[in-house]
Image (spheres, rainbow, N blue to C red):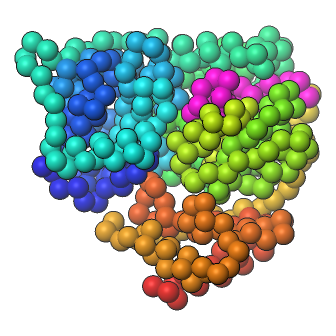
């Protein structure tokens, strides 16, 4: 059995640095465990553009085939494309090979259930236990699975987005939007040109080739989008678009060349959807108060969950939410599917621009204005981040705090939140307020209090 160290194992799957934690053997065993749990049957496998994608892909294929599963090979594909392919009735599950926003030396297996959602914590724990116990259900040579190419997954994804009731392709095409897009040499390079062609956009691209050698930090934070901002201004574009390597997060740059911040991606989508179809909203505990203020406009209720797409998606399903997501740019539109999807996020934003005949800067200025400060505390791989946060929670046991995920202090039009990351060996400290000064002050104070307890 491979040693399971220097790995992040969570509701998001298993991820690590290739050669220092995530090895071909680890990938093989997780795929064998997954195939033993969900097979035999057809398992969709897609990967992003990372340099190590082929290496991990073949290990995953071997693990699935050895347990009698057929591999539905959709090639290089986005996370939402893979999730939507997994939802098809003939398929029994799906694995996405991507480390999402992590640096290029990382890779990961994101494990999906038959319905296209990430595994529940309970199902994920069962997979991990199979790996630890080497509890694999191998088949004889004549029952080994086969590889089934399925190159149409991206087209099926785009067809579904274009067919949505709220998306009027003809109206968007009439506007001939000028768009600058930066997929950061990730999987977005395989689908964004097709999307913009279908929507009649005049598109300019930065870092388009999907070779996986990311030219900047792949997380689409405002601080990483300087080149995109300059290009929007240079091209006189209506907006700029940045996605992470697996295209489940979307960040926007206004027509003025100013990044809106990821939180306003979901804010714009929420305002547009609720204006047409009022209903429930589901978001995570670190998502902006912008969502609460928008929901109040339409008499809608906001449900908050722990951070992690599966938590939000499950809450969206149980509440019948009409819009959901995470404030990191992850738009979930349940009318399409219950997964974060930058492609549908782009379509909804362009539809809103086309209908309201306003600029992106004007649409954003119409929303409530908050400032969010995101910080983090780096830890070694073997640190117990949750236990460290638990000590802070214990200190405030008698206080009025939100324990939905980690520890969150609520104030008048402000909050500060500390929690262990699901995807990196860090503790996240995030605050939001009406001013950057207040948000930064609350982050610094909480970091200082946390440090005093360690």
Relative to 175, say whether 291 is above or below. below
Question: Residue 40 sits in which quadrant?
Answer: top left
Question: Residue 181 sits in which quadrant?
Answer: top right
Relative to 400, say whether 165 is above or below. above
- Along the viewing direction, whichever of 38 and 290 lies nearer the viewer: 38
Quick check: is 336 in the magenta stretch? yes
Question: Residue 274 sits in which quadrant?
Answer: top right
Residue 145 picture location, percent across and down: 20, 17
Relative to 444, say whether 369 is above or below. above
- Along the viewing direction, whichever of 179 and 278 lies nearer the viewer: 278
Q: Residue at x 69, y 43 (%)?
A: 282
Q: Residue pushed farthest left?
A: 141
- Residue 49 visible in rendering: no
> Would you say 391 lies left or right of 259 here?
left
Residue 68 picture location, percent across and down: 19, 20
Residue 359 picture location, percent across and down: 88, 35
Q: Which range of residues does the magenta coloring cover?
A: 330-356
Quadrant location of the C terminus?
bottom left
Q: Residue at x 16, y 30 (%)?
A: 137
Q: Residue at x 57, y 83 (%)?
A: 395
**Number of on-image labels:** 0
Quick check: is 11 in the magenta stretch? no
Relative to 116, say whether 444 is above or below. below
Q: Residue at x 46, y 55 (%)?
A: 422
- Along the viewing direction, whichever of 353 and 280 lies nearer the viewer: 280
- Residue 175 visible in rendering: yes
């Amino acid at each position: 059995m491979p040693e399971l160290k220097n790995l992040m194992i969570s509701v998001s799957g298993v991820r690590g640095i290739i050669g220092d934690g995530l090895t071909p053997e680890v990938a093989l065993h997780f795929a064998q465990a997954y195939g033993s749990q969900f097979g035999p049957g057809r398992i969709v496998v897609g990967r992003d553009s990372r340099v190590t994608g082929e290496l991990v892909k073949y290990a995953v294929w071997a693990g699935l085939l050895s347990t009698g599963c057929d591999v539905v090979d959709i090639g290089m594909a986005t996370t939402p494309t893979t999730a939507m392919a997994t939802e098809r009735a003939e398929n029994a599950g799906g694995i996405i090979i991507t480390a999402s926003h992590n640096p290029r030396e990382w890779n990961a297996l994101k494990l999906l259930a038959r319905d296209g959602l990430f595994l529940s914590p309970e199902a994920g724990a069962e997979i991990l236990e199979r790996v630890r116990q080497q509890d694999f259900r191998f088949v004889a040579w004549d029952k080994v699975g086969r590889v089934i190419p399925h190159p149409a997954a991206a087209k099926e994804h785009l067809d579904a987005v274009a067919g949505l009731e709220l998306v009027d392709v003809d109206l968007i095409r009439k506007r001939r939007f000028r768009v600058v897009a930066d997929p950061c040499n990730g999987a977005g390079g395989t689908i964004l040109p097709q999307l913009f062609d279908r929507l009649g956009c005049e598109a300019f691209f930065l870092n388009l080739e999907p070779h996986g050698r990311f030219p900047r930090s792949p997380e689409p934070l405002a601080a990483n989008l300087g080149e995109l901002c300059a290009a929007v201004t240079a091209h006189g574009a209506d907006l700029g678009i940045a996605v992470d390597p697996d295209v489940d997060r979307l960040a926007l740059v206004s027509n003025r060349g100013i990044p809106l911040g990821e939180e306003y991606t979901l804010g714009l989508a929420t305002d547009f959807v609720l204006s047409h179809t009022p209903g429930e909203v589901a978001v995570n505990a670190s998502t902006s108060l912008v969502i609460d203020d928008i929901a109040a406009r339409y008499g809608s209720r906001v449900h908050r969950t722990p951070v992690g797409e599966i938590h939000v998606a499950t809450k969206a399903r149980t509440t019948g939410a009409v819009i959901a997501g995470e404030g990191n740019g992850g738009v979930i539109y349940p009318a399409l599917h219950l997964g974060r999807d930058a492609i549908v996020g782009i379509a909804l934003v362009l539809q809103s621009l086309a209908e309201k005949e306003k600029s992106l800067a004007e649409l954003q200025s119409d929303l409530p204005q908050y400032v969010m400060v995101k910080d983090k505390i780096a830890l070694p791989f073997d640190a117990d981040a949750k236990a460290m946060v638990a000590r802070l929670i214990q200190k405030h046991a008698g206080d009025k705090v939100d324990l939905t995920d980690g520890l969150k202090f609520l104030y008048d039009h402000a909050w500060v939140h500390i929690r262990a990351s699901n995807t990196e060996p860090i503790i996240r400290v995030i605050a939001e307020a009406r001013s950057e000064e207040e948000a930064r002050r609350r982050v610094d104070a909480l970091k200082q209090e946390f440090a005093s307890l360690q």
